[in-house]
Each structure stands twice: as structure tokens, then as C-alpha cells.
């Protein structure tokens, strides 16, 4: 936890800029703010519609459900994708949504379900690597780009949304915002209040892909090959 | 309205007809056109090659030649754009910068002058045939003139315009580029000539003699049949 | 590898490029798709020019206060458990990273795509100190197996076709399937998954660092950068010193500009923002994090008329818009940074000596300037380079200098100019046939190698005008 060679480096920059080192810079005021105009004033239902349209572009299935039907919807998605090993994020939202109980039902029916827990250490990653699907709650959902924002933490390891072939995100309708602007602003405001940002913020828009071979779009490279969003109307 | 013609060195030497048509066209719309004989070349060949010092000598000549003009109008987006840049080229030369600004502010490309200053969108000309139009890069991207030539051509009676595929692509002229990087330039102009051929148009119309000379030279080498015309020639056709 | 690639002279590189039919077709079709994507993405927003203005203002403000923001960034990274190393040049950066690898006793290093590590030749340095280095971006992996440099900054293996890729996989990795891109990619997934799981160190580049929180953001589609920053215990992120924004609010705008301008996506599949080490209670992510901030010639650009070249966000929109790039391909530039931005940056970072032709590899059509999402006046920078090559470096030919001195005299002396309009036709008459010159002398030689040149008119315009005036006066 050190910083090497900084002063020499920055002194030289200040010299090139032909002024003394700056220790204070006022927040800049920009002449235009087009980012605020995108889907300004859209209702939650309109944002859901925008999200659905964008998901067609990013090869992502959208399932709409309610909190009462959520467990069934997850099972449906897993069956559609022929998955029976599931790694799930844990934490308060999973506890309060009742999903943890429904996982017990799933286990009884032969599914292998692993809930991410700090105490299990590396075992979490090992399971995720073998899992057919990983499931998370979206923290903020960006309608414009069809993006799930995850503040990865001890309940929500980075591997869950990365290693399994299928990525499943539960999207409470209330988490929808127009675009990345609102998510970035929230993080910025938190930083200003002294609340440090998560060690990893993942903005995920559908499955992984590449166009590196003759510009052919290949869906599914290193990350997930398939993605499904389950939008929960009453959360 | 008194207008001075900025002929450009290429039109002066190689395609004088473009100058004649430009004068007649302007006169038709009530302009009194003169031709300051002390004008030379805008300096672009030297400026774009990195010879700023050499270019600025010619630029000063141009500034002097047009000092007494009310409006300066030229049949080339690229050369007019060069004049628009005189103030920045001469920004460190006391006295010249202001004179350069005077010239830049009163200089217009022909179609720009017709549409923006004379407020003419229909020059009442007749020209029979099919044509495709190449929007030159400097005219479009740097001078910002793209609607004026299109509007004027659309109103020419008898003329059918066919859209040129990938029209915004450079023809490969680039002044000294065509000589210095002749092989690349050759590939670029060949691609352009192929696009022109694909339109099957009778005429290729453009607003810059440099580009037209480049495309025309390639089309001739290819034995392509389309005739190359400057927009002034079409607009002055009765 | 360093900035310069290969040692062929410019003329040979151009000849190779023009002669490579597959590459040219691939580039042409890629440019078409990229361009359509970019224009569609811009159109969707409806106010693209405002976005560009905002992008330019953000970059300008950041560059003007770069010392402040880099200081803030390093403080924040340190606060979050990371180590920051400011490297003056490639050798300092490489030596530091080698030292980290040595301390970790690292055998395998897995990398995600990073132009700056190409620039400093990091792979070679690590290999020399005994590490196996694996590139994990699909395109970069193909190139690494084939020992070929990148030809595009976003899709580095653009010049290769699937048959060539199949052969490379077969020869180097024992691949036995077809050249179907899906099968090729699935093979890469399977092979590289092992590397991700076994690597001791993950190395990433950095699209944008956020000063306020000490965050490095990676913009990717394949997911490899997430692998690299999730699985190995040690992560090293290498960034060019200009790749920074003040806060998350600016980050968001630049990411939006980048993904739209680069590939026409609203966002790429993964925007990954990494801050320091994993927390004590977290299971995955690095326990040791190093941020290496590289100057390597960039500070020489600060404070000069080229400063806005540092505004570049590496989207390649200028490359995708450039008609010269389309016909010659990336390798012709002889630099890991090709196209218009490469022609501007390469001489600044690596000197004029080896790259003096690059600023002339442009018609100055300004398609690059128009495409740039942060409004870098690329074609104007190319003209400035040419001025420096002429006036300060004196790297042009004697004959060109004489020609241009003659030009100055001609264009500033009306009598000389007028005489030339009279004489041009006669002077060129030995080469003229049927009103055209098909094989010209001197400077016309290059021109007429490719196309005909029109003979000057019998009567110049000014002659006609004089006669007309006389007729009118009579």
C-alpha cells in the first residue's frame, strides 16, 4: 500500500502545463448535459418496455413475473435452459424474498443449489465454475442499454455472474432507471458522502460476445453464453 | 451586388469554362462581377504539405488582391475553405491576421453564395440527363456546405440525380497526396470510379476541380463513359 | 513489441497492404459495419453533437488538471489497499511489474486486452523473466499464438480470416474442428478457462480510471477482463496516464461515447469498475492490487498544440472512417496505433525518425475529425506534424523544398503566376496526347501512374476574361 515515484511524475506534469501543482480544483461546469434528457420522465412501466426492446438486441430473454411467482419463474428458466446446478447470491434480499426457502424445495426435487457465503471460501468459486447458471438480484437496472448493475460484495461474488454458462438476473421493477447516468450519479453522491464504492461494480448487458473472427458476432465467449432477466412487477 | 470572382488556379489554367459559367451565373442574378487580376493560388498545396512559410507568401498576395472586394466567390469548396483558414495560419503576423479575417468573412463558395447570400435555390436552368453528385470532403466537412448544391441541383429541369454509393468517402485527391502517396490515391479513386460506374449516370457532377480532375482522370483511364462536369456548368446550362 | 512494429520501410508496407486482397475486403466490410453502427447509435441519441461537446469538455478539463486528478486517484487507490507505481517510461513500468511477478513467484500471467502493455512491450519483459503470458482477448490470443502484431485497436485480428485462425489453432494448440467461428470461439473458451483458473497474476489495461474513488474501469464484451480481475490473487492494472476522469459522472459519459463510437453499442456486455483489493469478507477478486500509471512520452505532449491528441478514448472511430486505412490496413502504419490517431500519436510518442511518412498518409478529408467522439481535430494535427517535419526536422527531400520555394515565389508574384497560366500548355505539350497526359514527367509521374491528367486549356480563364473586358470596353 504505497505510492511510488509520484511527486517527480506530477511535478513534471505541472511544469509542462506551465503552472504550479494544483491541490484544489473546482468541480467543472459543462456547457451541455445531454445525458439527463434520455428517457427523462419515463414511468417504471415505460422503462420496462424500453428494457424489453433492448433485450432483443442483446440476445437476452425477459420473463415478467410477480414476487409470489418468482420461485416458479426461476425454475422455469432453469428447465428451459436445461440447467440443474445453480449458484445463487445470498444476503438480505434473498432472505426477504423467500427464495432461500424455495431453494430447499428445489434441492428436494433434485436441483443442486449453492448459496454464496463468505464462510465457504474458495468452495463458492469451485461450485460456480461447475454450475449451469448463476443468479443475482440487480441493484440498479439501466433500461436504455438493458444493463444489470451489481455491487459485488460478500453475498454476491463476482464469479456468480461470470463463470456459469447461463446468467439469470432478478430485476425488481423499482430498480429500473433510464440509463447509466442515474447509476453513476448515485455512486458519485455516495462517494461524496464518504460511502466508498463496492470493490467491483459490474454493469452487465446480456451474455458475453465477440466479433473478433471476421466480424462474426459470436454470443458466448469467456463469460455466460445465455442470459435471462426476470422482471418482478411488485418489487 | 458587387462580386469578385476567385477563379482558383486549376479553373484558371485547366478548366476556364467553369470560370465563364460562374460569371454568367452570378450575372444572371444581378451581380456585377469583376476579376482581380493579381489573384494567384490559395496556397493549399504548400500549406497542406507542411510548408506554412511558403504558403503564407501566396496567402498575403491573395489578401492584397481581394482587399477592395465586397464579396469574393469561388467555384471550389476546398480553396474557399483554405481562405477561411488564413486567419489561423497568419495569426502570429501582426496586421495580417486582421486583413485575413476581412477576406475570410467575405469569401463564399459558389453554391453557398447562391443559396445563403442571394437566396436563390432555383437557378432556372435546364440540363437533360442522369447525373450523380460527389460531395467533396472539404466543402462538406470543413466548409459545412452540403445542402446548397443538393437543393440547386434538385431544381434543375430535366436533370435526374442518382445517389452515389458511399458518397461521403474521399476520392483520394488530397492535393499533393495524389502524388506523394500515388499508389494509395490510385486505389481510392478507383473505388470511387467504380461507385460512379455503378450508378450508370451520364454525368458526374462535383463542386471542386481537384476532385473532378482526379476522378475524371481515373474514369478516362478506365474508359468510363460518364462526362465530368463542374456544378457551375450544370447550373448555367439553359 | 513496442510502438513500432516490423522493420519494413513505409513503401514496402504500403505495397504489402494494397496487395493483400483478403485483408482489404475484411477491412472494408468491417468499416462498413462499424460505420453503420456508429451512425445508428448517434442517431438514436438525436443530440450526438451535444454529447461530443460534452466529451471534449470533459477531456479538456481533465487534461488541464491532470496532476491533480492523478494525485487524487493514487490517494484513493492506496486507501483501498492498492499500490500505485508511477512509471516514467516503458522500462520503469516493465521492471516494476517484473518485480511484482518475482515476489509472487508467478509462473503464469493472464492478460486482458491492453494497448498500453503492447506499447511498453510488457509480454516480452515478463517472458524474459520466466513467466508464461497468456493473452485472453480472443483476437489478441489468436495474434499471440501466431506472433503477429495487432492491426486495429478494437478488433486486433481484423486482418486474419477464419481459415488462417483454424490453422493457427491446429498448429499451436492441436485444434481438430472446423473453421466455423462458433467452434473456434468455443475452443478458445475451453482452453483459456484453464488459464484463468491457474494464473498467478491477472494483468488488465484501463479504459478510464475514476479519480474520486480510485476505480479502474474496463469496457469489454467477451468477459475475459472480468475473469482476469476475478480469479487470480494478484491484479496489475496498467494505464496510460491520460486515461482518467474526475468522477463517476464523467465516467458514464465517456463510456457511453466509447461504446457507441467504437461499435455502435449502447453499452458493451461488460463495464467493470474495480476499486482496490477485494474486501476482507469477500471471496473472489484480487487480494493484492497494483496500478501502474505510464507516461512513456505522453507528458511531452502536454502543454503543446498536440495536447488534444491525449483526449483520445481509443474507440477507433477515426480508423473505421478512414479511407486510407481501408486500402492499406493496420500493419502498413508500422505502429501498434494505426489509422489517423496512430498517424498523430506515433510520431509524438516514438519520434519522427521512424514514422515521418505517417502524417502524409492522409488526404486530409477530415472523415476522422468528423467521426471522433471527443472532437480531436485529427486532420489539423496531421498538418501540424507536416509543418514540423518540414520546418524543424528537415526530413523532406531537397527536390520538394525547391519545388515549394518555387511555389511561394509563383503564388506571391502575379506576373510569374500569369506567365505560368500562359505557358503551362506549351510546357506540357511534349507529354500531351488528345488533350490528356497519360505519362507525365516529374511530380506528375505518380499521378499519371494511376490516372490521366488533363492538359491545360488553350486559353486560360484570365486571358478569356481580358478579351471579354476589352470587347466590352470597345
Image (tube, coloured by chain):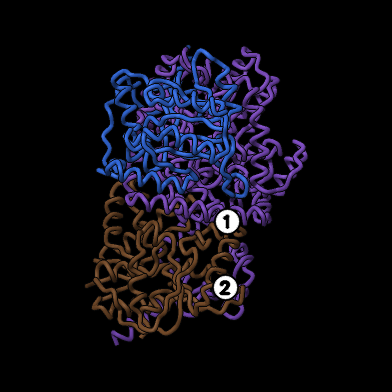
Chain colours: A blue, B brown, C purple
Tag 2, which secondary structure? helix
User: Quadrant of residue A44 in the image?
Assistant: top left
State whether residue C295 appears in this view.
no
Q: Is residue B235 above or below residue C245?
A: below
Tag 1, which secondary structure? helix
Residue found farthest to the bottom: C474
Q: Residues within 10 Å of mark 1 (few under 14, many from 20)?
A: some
Residue found farthest to the left: B1
* Chain ID of residue with mark 1: C
Q: Residue at x 51, y 63 (%)?
A: B171
Residue B213 in the image: state x and y as whole percent.
51, 70
Q: Is residue C331 above or below residue A170?
A: below
Residue C31 in the image: state x and y as whole percent.
53, 53
Q: Residue at x 49, y 23 (%)?
A: A104
State whether residue B45 appears in this view.
yes
Report the front residue among B26 and C444: B26
Label 2 sits on residue: B219
Residue C324 in the image: state x and y as whole percent.
55, 54
Label 1 sits on residue: C28
Q: Residue at x 60, y 68 (%)?
A: C451
Image quarter (top left, top right, bottom left or bottom right) of the C terminus of chain A: top left
Residue C51 appears left or right of C187: left
**Looking at the image, is mark 2 or mark 1 nearer the viewer?**
1
User: Quadrant of residue A109 in the image?
Assistant: top right
Q: Residues within 10 Å of mark 2 (few under 14, many from 20)?
A: many
* Chain ID of residue with mark 2: B
The mark found on residue C77 in the picture is none
Q: CA distance from mark 2 to mark 1?
A: 22 Å
Amino acid at each position: 500500500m504505497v505510492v511510488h515515484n509520484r511527486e517527480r511524475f506530477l511535478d513534471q506534469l505541472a511544469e509542462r502545463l506551465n503552472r504550479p501543482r494544483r491541490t484544489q480544483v473546482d468541480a467543472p461546469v459543462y456547457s451541455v448535459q445531454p445525458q439527463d434528457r434520455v428517457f427523462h420522465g419515463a414511468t417504471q412501466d415505460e422503462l420496462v418496455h424500453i428494457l424489453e426492446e433492448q433485450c432483443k438486441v442483446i440476445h437476452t430473454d425477459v420473463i415478467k413475473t410477480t414476487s409470489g411467482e418468482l420461485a416458479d419463474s426461476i425454475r422455469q428458466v432453469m428447465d428451459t435452459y436445461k440447467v440443474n446446478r445453480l449458484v445463487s447470491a445470498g444476503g438480505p434480499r434473498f432472505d426477504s424474498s423467500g427464495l432461500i426457502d424455495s431453494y430447499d424445495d428445489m434441492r428436494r426435487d433434485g436441483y443442486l443449489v449453492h448459496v454464496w457465503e463468505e464462510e465457504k471460501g474458495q468452495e463458492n468459486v469451485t461450485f460456480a465454475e461447475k454450475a449451469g447458471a448463476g443468479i443475482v438480484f440487480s441493484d440498479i437496472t439501466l433500461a436504455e442499454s438493458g444493463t444489470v448493475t451489481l455491487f459485488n460484495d460478500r453475498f454476491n461474488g463476482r464469479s456468480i455472474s461470470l463463470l456459469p454458462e447461463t446468467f439469470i438476473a432478478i430485476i425488481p421493477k423499482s430498480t429500473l432507471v433510464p440509463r447509466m447516468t442515474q447509476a453513476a450519479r448515485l455512486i458519485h453522491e455516495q462517494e461524496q458522502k464518504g460511502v466508498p464504492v463496492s470493490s467491483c461494480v459490474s454493469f452487465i448487458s446480456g451474455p458475453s460476445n465477440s466479433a473478433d473472427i471476421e466480424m462474426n458476432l459470436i454470443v458466448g465467449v469467456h463469460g455466460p453464453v445465455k442470459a435471462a432477466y426476470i422482471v418482478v412487477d411488485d418489487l | 451586388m458587387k462580386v469578385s470572382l476567385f477563379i482558383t488556379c486549376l479553373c484558371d489554367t485547366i478548366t476556364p469554362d467553369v470560370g465563364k459559367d460562374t460569371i454568367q451565373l452570378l450575372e444572371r442574378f444581378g451581380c456585377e462581377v469583376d476579376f482581380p487580376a493579381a489573384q494567384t493560388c490559395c496556397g493549399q498545396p504548400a500549406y497542406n504539405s507542411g510548408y506554412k512559410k511558403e504558403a503564407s507568401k501566396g496567402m498575403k498576395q491573395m489578401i492584397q488582391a481581394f482587399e477592395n472586394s465586397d464579396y469574393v466567390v469561388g467555384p471550389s469548396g476546398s480553396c474557399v475553405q483554405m481562405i477561411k483558414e488564413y486567419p489561423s495560419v497568419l495569426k502570429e503576423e501582426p496586421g495580417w491576421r486582421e486583413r485575413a479575417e476581412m477576406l475570410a468573412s467575405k469569401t463564399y463558395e459558389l453554391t453557398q453564395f447562391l443559396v445563403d447570400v442571394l437566396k436563390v435555390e432555383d437557378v432556372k436552368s435546364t440540363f437533360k440527363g442522369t447525373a450523380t453528385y460527389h460531395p467533396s470532403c472539404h466543402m462538406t466537412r470543413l466548409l459545412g456546405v452540403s445542402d446548397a448544391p443538393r437543393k440547386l441541383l434538385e431544381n434543375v429541369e430535366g436533370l435526374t440525380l442518382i445517389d452515389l454509393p458511399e458518397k461521403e468517402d474521399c476520392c483520394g485527391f488530397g492535393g499533393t497526396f495524389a502524388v506523394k502517396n500515388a499508389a494509395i490515391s490510385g486505389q481510392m479513386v478507383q473505388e470511387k470510379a467504380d461507385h460512379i460506374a455503378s450508378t450508370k449516370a451520364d454525368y458526374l457532377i462535383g463542386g471542386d476541380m481537384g476532385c473532378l480532375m482526379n476522378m475524371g482522370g481515373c474514369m478516362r483511364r478506365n474508359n468510363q463513359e460518364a462526362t465530368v462536369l463542374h456544378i457551375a456548368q450544370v447550373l448555367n446550362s439553359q | 513489441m513496442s510502438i513500432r512494429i516490423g522493420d519494413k520501410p513505409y513503401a514496402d508496407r504500403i505495397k504489402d497492404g494494397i496487395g493483400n486482397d483478403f485483408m482489404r475486403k475484411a477491412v472494408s466490410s468491417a468499416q462498413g459495419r462499424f460505420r453503420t453502427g456508429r451512425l445508428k447509435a448517434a442517431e438514436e441519441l438525436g443530440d450526438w453533437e451535444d454529447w461530443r461537446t460534452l466529451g471534449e469538455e470533459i477531456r479538456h478539463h481533465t487534461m488541464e488538471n491532470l496532476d491533480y486528478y492523478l494525485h487524487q486517484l493514487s490517494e484513493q487507490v492506496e486507501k483501498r489497499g492498492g499500490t500505485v507505481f508511477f512509471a516514467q517510461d516503458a522500462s520503469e513500468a516493465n521492471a516494476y511489474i517484473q518485480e511484482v511477478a518475482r515476489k509472487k513467484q508467478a509462473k503464469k500471467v493472464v492478460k486482458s486486452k491492453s494497448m498500453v502493455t503492447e506499447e511498453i512491450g510488457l509480454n516480452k519483459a515478463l517472458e524474459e523473466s520466466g513467466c508464461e503470458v497468456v493473452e485472453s482477448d480472443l483476437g489478441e490470443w489468436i495474434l499471440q499464438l501466431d506472433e503477429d502484431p495487432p492491426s486495429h485497436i478494437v478488433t486486433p485480428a481484423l486482418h486474419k480470416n477464419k481459415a488462417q485462425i483454424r490453422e493457427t489453432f491446429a498448429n499451436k494448440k492441436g485444434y481438430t474442428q472446423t473453421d466455423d467461428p462458433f467452434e473456434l470461439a468455443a475452443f478458445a473458451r475451453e482452453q483459456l478457462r484453464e488459464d484463468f483458473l491457474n494464473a498467478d497474476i491477472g494483468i488488465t489495461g484501463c479504459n478510464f480510471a475514476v479519480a474520486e474513488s480510485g476505480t479502474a474501469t474496463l469496457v469489454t464484451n467477451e468477459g475475459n477482463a472480468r475473469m482476469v480481475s476475478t480469479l487470480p490473487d494478484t491484479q496489475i492494472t496498467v494505464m496510460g496516464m491520460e486515461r482518467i476522469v474526475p468522477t463517476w459522472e464523467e465516467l458514464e459519459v465517456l463510456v457511453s461515447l466509447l461504446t457507441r463510437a467504437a461499435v455502435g453499442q449502447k453499452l458493451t456486455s461488460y463495464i467493470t469498475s474495480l476499486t482496490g483489493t477485494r474486501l476482507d469478507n469477500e471471496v473472489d477478486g484480487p487480494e493484492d492490487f497494483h496500478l501502474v500509471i505510464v507516461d512513456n512520452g505522453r507528458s511531452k505532449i502536454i502543454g503543446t498544440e498536440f495536447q488534444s491528441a491525449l483526449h483520445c478514448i481509443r474507440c477507433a472511430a477515426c480508423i473505421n472512417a478512414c479511407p486510407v486505412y481501408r486500402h492499406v490496413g493496420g500493419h502498413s502504419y508500422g505502429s501498434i496505433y494505426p489509422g489517423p490517431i496512430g498517424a498523430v500519436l506515433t510520431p509524438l510518442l516514438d519520434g519522427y525518425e521512424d514514422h515521418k511518412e505517417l502524417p502524409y498518409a492522409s488526404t486530409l478529408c477530415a472523415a476522422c475529425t468528423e467521426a471522433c467522439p471527443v472532437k480531436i481535430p485529427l486532420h489539423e494535427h496531421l498538418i501540424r506534424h507536416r509543418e514540423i517535419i518540414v520546418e524543424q526536422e528537415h526530413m523532406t527531400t531537397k527536390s520538394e523544398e525547391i519545388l515549394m520555394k518555387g511555389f511561394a515565389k509563383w503564388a506571391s508574384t502575379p506576373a510569374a503566376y500569369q506567365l505560368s497560366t500562359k505557358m503551362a500548355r506549351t510546357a506540357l505539350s511534349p507529354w500531351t496526347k488528345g488533350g490528356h497526359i497519360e505519362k507525365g514527367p516529374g511530380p506528375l509521374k505518380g499521378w499519371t501512374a494511376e490516372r490521366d491528367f488533363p492538359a491545360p486549356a488553350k486559353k486560360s480563364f484570365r486571358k478569356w476574361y481580358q478579351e471579354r473586358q476589352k470587347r466590352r470596353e470597345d
